[in-house]
Structures are given as structure tokens and as C-alpha cells.
Image (cartoon, rainbow, N blue to C red):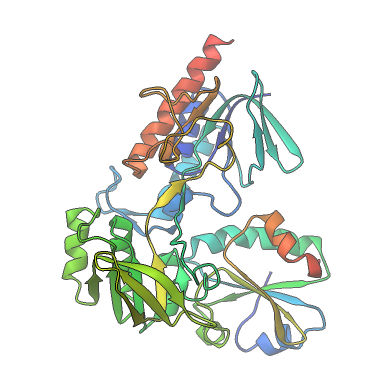
Amino acid sequence: MHDVIIIGSGPAGYTAAIYAARANLSPVLFASSVESGGDLMTTTDVENYPGFPTGIQGPELMFNMQQQAERFGTEVRLEDVTSLELDGDVKKVWVGEELFETKTLIFATGSAYRKLGVEGEERLSGRGISWCATCDGFFFKGKNLVVVGGGDSAMEEAMFLTTFADKVTIVHRSETFRASPVMLDRARANEKIEFITNSAVSRVIGEEAVTSLELTDTVTGATSEIEIDGLFIAIGSDPRTHLIHDKLTLNDDGTIVVDGRSSKTNIEGVFAAGDVVDGTYRQAVTAAASGMVAALDAQHHLEDHA
Amino acid sequence: MKNVTKDSFQADVLNSDKPVLVDFWAEWCGPCRMVGPILEQIDGETDKIEIVKVNVDENPELAQQFQITSIPNMKVFKGGEVVKDIIGAKPKAALEADLADFL
């Protein structure tokens, strides 16, 4: 029987692990096999995480957090939890046929990239459509690209892609941007970047690979077509709750309901942290803080039920 | 896992008697670094399929020839033809399911 099992390996999961491990709770952390490290694994420069005056690469930050968690005795398992049983005092965590039992569970699975939900998107994924500029930008040297989205990640993707592409057009459905002013100004100052506002991608066109996009004007409803070589989608993400959506209470935005400023879910002994509870801020630093809260809540729960 | 280059691709992949899974990858690709160890494991568990990797940074000609625009991209070659195309990192069980015909 474990004291603490953590599911998720972003800043929330690893910070929870650091605190739980330092409290001698020997946490087991399921990092997932292919998404270990979370969203920061596909981020380049992280310039707003305190303590790194010249910035740090996303993957490096995550490797550091993993090492820090392991240093105090966290067992990191690169496996995918397949199902959970949360009723009763003993929580059951299944990884395929293998069962892990724990007194407390910290759920920190973050969020998954949102899809456009338009014709051609599924079929052309990986054939000119990408959700990861740092992974796939390399293949678009000298090409003409579109980035969809209006947040910081869209600006960052667009700027990163200009190191390869000849031209990057940011397509955004509104005239106002959620991106921070500093990121928006940087994108606007980049001469390879153009903007098309009040437009939504309504269809992705191409036989073997993406060749063009159909855009719909969000004000007039008029459609137009633009030729492109690649499409990068950065329209945000949704909380990753498929393991618990029928067990834990969720908010309207899909995040897990927690009690006030704590990490307590509607099931005793089950705690949630990071982007999976945060529909608002969703930063590495808020996720880390939230992971700390979950670790302390789990620790107090164990003390109260000792 | 063997590193295949543009010079050895013909012999190692196209002329192979067995099916060959080629993992197109790069150092800077986070998801590639996740899927690499899974492929190593599968490679150690079966003799029915060869598993090799191509570094797209060092072999851009191969990446271009096979129209790769997203990595990791795992292609299974049989008799010199692509018979299976898997794009994106996946957990081991999902990869094994995709490769069931060859394992």
C-alpha cells in the first residue's frame, strides 16, 4: 500500500512529488509513457518561470523537476494509468493488468490540445497539420504557414516558425487577443508574420498533404480560401479528465471542482492540482504552487487518518 | 536500435527480407525522445520486425523523400514499400496494437 500516488508529470505533478517525497511519503508518480514532462516538453524558451534570469528550455526545466523529485525518493514510472477506482479508503490505480493501491491520490494530468473540429483536420494530422511547432517546424523551411489562435502559445509558435518558414499568418477568430501585450507586440514587429483577424478556419483542404484552408469571416459569414503548406493549431486546451470524468465533480469548463483554495475533490483522499483544476491562469508557476497544495493536503489527510 | 542513413537506407530498409520499422526522429523533438525507449523495448521483444531509426537532421534527403512533416513518424517497410504509417508518439500498448500485423 502506497501513501501517495501522483498521476501527471508537469510542474504540478513534480512539485507535489517534491513536497511529498521530502515529507518521507515515498510517492509514486505515473508520468505517462509518451507525454512525460507535460506541455513544457514541447515549449522552447520559458522566460517567466522565476529563478532563471536568462530563461530556460521547457524540456530542461522538466528534467530538472524530475531529478529534484527523484532526489528525495520519488519513484517515477513512465507508464500510463488506464483506470481508477476511487471508492473507499483504498484507492486503486490500474496500469493495464497491474494494480497499485494507495491511501491518497493526486490527480495532475493537465490539459490536452484542443482541436478545430473541422473537415480535413483528422485526415491531414501529421500531413501538414501540427500542434507542435518545436517538433515539426523544421520540416517547413521556406514554406508558407498558418498558425490558428490568439493566445500566447499562438504568438510563440508563430515566432518560432519564422526561423524556418518564409511567411507565417496568424488566423484568429476575433479582433482582440488573449495573448499578453509583450508577446503580441513581438509578433506584430516580426516582418515575416501577418495577421488575419475575425476569421475562423472552417475546412482544411488537401489530398495527400495540406494545400489550402477555407476561412469563414466570423462577422459576415463569407468564406475564402488561402493556399498554405502547413497549419499549426494553437487554440488552447481542455482539462484531461477522461480517467475521472464520471467519478469526480467537474466545473462547466471541464476542470475538476476543488474545495476553496485547497486541492480537495468531492472524494476524500483524492486531490487535484495544476491545469486540470485551473481554467484561468494555467501557468507553470501556478501549476507548481497547486502541486504543493495537493501534497500538503494529502499529507494532512494521512496524518488525520493514521 | 540501428541508425540508418541515406547511404545505408537501400540495404538496411528497402532490401530487407523482414519488415522494417523506421523511426524518423530528431534530438530536439520531445515526443520522439519519449517514443524511442518504447521502440527499444519492442525491438528487444520480437525478431519478426527490424526496428531502426533515421535522424532527420542528419538525413534531410530521406525526410523529404518520404514527405515527413511531423515527427515522430514511424513507417513500416515491407518489400521496399511503405505498408504502415504511424504519426505521433503513442503509449506502448497503442503502438503494439498498430503493429499487430508485424509482431
Identity of the residue drawn at 64% across and 79% down: B4
Q: Is residue B30 above or below residue B13?
A: above
Closer-to-camera residue (A127/A72):
A127
Identity of the residue drawn at 17% across and 55% down: A181
Q: Quadrant of residue A228?
A: bottom left
* Horizontal relation, residue B96 to residue A136: left or right: right
Image quadrant holding the N terminus of chain B, namely bottom right
Image quadrant holding the C terminus of chain B, namely bottom right
In percent of width and height, residue A255 lies at: 44, 38
Q: Is residue B90 above or below residue A75?
A: below
In percent of width and height, residue A10 lies at: 46, 44
Identity of the residue drawn at 48% across and 49% down: A38
* Horizontal relation, residue B28 to residue A185: left or right: right
* Residue A273 visible (yes or no): yes
Identity of the residue drawn at 72% across and 58% down: B41
* Horizontal relation, residue A57 to residue B16: left or right: left
In percent of width and height, residue A171 lies at: 30, 68
Closer-to-camera residue (A302/B53):
A302
In percent of width and height, residue A212 lies at: 40, 80
Closer-to-camera residue (A276/B66):
A276
Q: Is residue B79 above or below residue A199?
A: below
* Residue A164 visible (yes or no): no
